[in-house]
Image (spheres, rainbow, N blue to C red):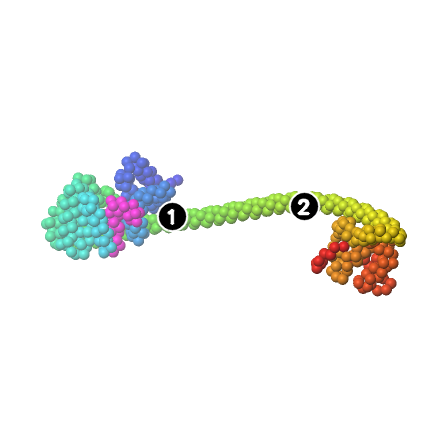
Amino acid sequence: MLSESWLQRLFLLLFFIVCHLITGRAQSLIIAEQVNHQYPDSAFRLIKLKLDKAVSQHNELAQGDYLQQIGSLLYHQGSYVQAIDYLLQAQKIFRNANDEHRLANNHNELGTVYYYNEQPDRALTQFTDALAYYQRSRNAKGLAQTYANIGHIYEKRRDAKKAYQYQKQALVHSRIANDTGSLTKIYENLGSIFEDEARYDSAHSYYQQALVLTQKTHDGIGQIEIINNLGDVFRKTGRYKQGMALSQQALQLSQQKNERYQLSAALRDIAKTFRLLNQPDSAYKYIELSRDLTDEIYAIENNRQITLLQTLFDVERKDSEIAQLNAQKQVDLIIITATCVVLLLIGVLAFVIISRQRLKIRNEQALNQQNQQIFSTQNELMRAELKNKQLEEENLKGQLELKSKELTSHTLQIIQKNQVLEAIKDDLAVILKDDKRDQKKQLRQLLEKIGQSFDRDKYWDDFRRIFDQIHPHFFEQLAHQFPDLTPTDLRLIALLKMNINSADVATLLGISSDSLRVSRYRLRKKIGLAEGESLSAYIHSVSVQRLPAPENSPV
């Protein structure tokens, strides 16, 4: 079963949540102060949950408010260093958001923490910054609170003049703002200043005005503080009975409200009064009661601070673990993302490589196909060329055969003509043997003409043309090798090249067989044949090459 303490704590937390939902932020802050005082660890957890929610929602102003609440909670529990850290975080958010109202309020909170952390110079700087913001916005309530804070610092510095000036300014702005709470505190501060200056009448007056205001606002704790202060004034002025009565009243109110701090202060004041009344036993009794209560208060507050610090440590450790997990998640996410990017790049690279290979293969296939087509076309062209050459060769063979037949026919015609002419010549020779003197001259002329016809006959020109077509460059080669050859020698060589027998050669040349032998002998000497070598064989062995000849001589 849950203990009564935990039940009370749970009830207060639920009550705070309901108030926050129903009445809003202002009323919830009042409830929050009560929870902060009695159960600071639970209050811290609750505010931390709200802070985490604001962070997740990216609500920066809400983050600043909750950081400020945590700072205030830590301050009330005496954890000044941690309180300063949270308030500085809130201050940074408010400054970035340019929210001067929240920023000024945070400056006042931070200045108060600095003051109780025994850093009055820093506290004064914070109060001065807050004062500048409130002056620009003409916020009377803020000005009253800030002037009061600055005056309190000068009071502790024993500068009563400045302390009084700032408290008077705070009093003016508090009345303008009609802020009873701050007005009560300012009256109390003024009373404290005059009390320190031993101006007890003025101090009593301001304490009395503050007491009236606390009674109107039903501020029980404030009443106890002011009653204790009034008792001090009476005790310092020698009015011990009146002072004792006020201290007894403060004691009763503290017991009713279970306010240990005020109860301890009342017990100390009563002990002081009994000491001044020369009642040491009673003074000792009350001072011991005050000391015991102080020890109890210290133990309770110490336990609360330890619990709060343990809670703070647990929350920070949990936040650290969460941050580590988030960082690890981010690292894992980065690794996964990088892996995916690498795999994607590898896939893209593989796709590019495969595409290039496919393109290369297609290009090679197209090139091979093109080469095959070119090869096929070249092959067809070569076949066509070969066929054309074969046809041309066959045509040339046909023409050669035709020319050979033509040459042979022409040669036979020449032979027949020469045979006829030879017969005519013989007949004419017989006629010349006769004694008919009147015919000799004519017949001699006829013989000369027939003899000349053997040399100038146009048939030899036709023979040369046809022979050159069958044996191209043959005469050029001979003329180049043997420049001394005569046209008659060339005719003899051509007839021997055609394998014509000696009788027909003599007939074609128009000479006798003996003359033919003499011509052959002379020809052998010109071409330098040794004895026993065949003239016809040598002529057939002559290789025909295209050589420049000095001049083509007619056959």
The quarter of the rendered structure image containing the N terminus is top left
State how many labels appear: 2
Q: Residue at x 75, y 59 (%)?
A: 479
The quarter of the rendered structure image containing the C terminus is bottom right
Q: Earlier in the sequence, mark 2 or mark 1?
A: 1
Q: Whole-percent x and y of residue 95?
A: 28, 48
Q: Residue at x 18, y 51 (%)?
A: 151
Say which of marks 2 and 1 sits in front.
2
Pointer 2 with pointer 1, Cβ within 8 A = no
Q: Which residues are magenta?
A: 90-119
Q: Residue at x 13, y 49 (%)?
A: 203
Q: Whole-percent x and y of residue 551?
A: 71, 58
Figure check: 484 above or below 28: below
Under mark 1, the amino acid is Val
Disc 2 on helix, strand or loop?
helix
Q: Whole-percent x and y of residue 71?
A: 30, 48
Horizontally, is 100 left or right of 365 in the view? left
Question: In this view of the protein, can residue 192 be seen by the observer?
Answer: no
Foreground residue among 183 and 439: 439
Name the residue beneath numbered marker 2: 378
Name the residue beneath numbered marker 1: 315
Give the prevailing secondary structure in the magenta stretch.
helix
User: How dense is the environment of label 2, judged by Cα within 10 Å: few (below 14), some, or many (20 and up)?
Assistant: some
Under mark 2, the amino acid is Gln
